Image (cartoon, helix red, strand yellow):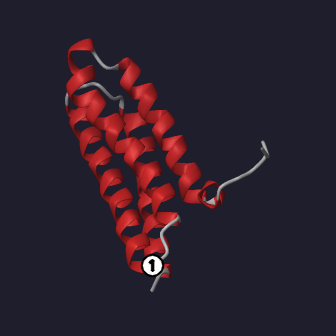
Amino acid sequence: MEEDFIFDFEKLKVYQKALDFLHEIFIIYKKLPNEFKFSLGTNLIRAGISISNNIAEGSGKKSKKEKARYYGTSLDSTRECISVFNVFLREGFLDKITYKKIRLDGKEITNMLFGLIRSLG
């Protein structure tokens, strides 16, 4: 078994950016008040994981239409995360500096995903 094998999706910048985004989500999750970790926190983690998982899954699809559908789901999940961050900011669970940074990261991911989808023609 080759230990250094890299899957095609692991070479995608958007996939790597999605993993970084997910890491930031875990940091935010760990700081949430316990009473919100299960409801809001797990929802955010699921949406964050969906971004990278759908990029990985979509990259392996044969048809452009299927690829676009999975990348679109990643796009939707990124936007879902942004919505949760808006709630967190309003409720005082996120400081403005973290909020602005995570939004910029989300914007970069959505732009990259739009580019991937457009490239499929």
Along the line of sight, the residue nearer the viewer: 93 or 45: 45
Q: How many marks?
A: 1
Classify 104 as above or below 69: above
Q: Which residue is denoted by mark 1 in the rendering?
A: 63
Residue that extends furthest to the top in the rendered view of this protein? 34
Q: Residue at x 44, y 79 (%)?
A: 64
Looking at the image, which is closer to me, 21 or 91?
21
Quick one: quadrant of the C terminus? bottom left
Side of 86 where 67 appears, left or right:
right
Which residue is at 42% across, 55% downward?
Answer: 54
Q: Is 45 situated above or below 110?
A: above
Considering the numbered disc 1 on the image, is that residue within a helix, a strand or a loop? loop
Q: Residue at x 53, y 43 (%)?
A: 19
| Residue 20 percent location from the top left of the image | 54, 42
- Specify whether 114 is left or right of 23: left
Q: In this image, 102 relative to 6: left or right?
A: left
* Left or right: 59 in relation to 31: right
Residue 107, quarter of picture: bottom left
Depth check, front residue: 45 or 63? 63
**Above-or-below relation of 74 to 44:** below
Q: Residue furthest bottom?
A: 121
Given the image, on which type of amino acid does mark 1 rest?
Ser
Residue 38, percent from left and from top: 24, 22
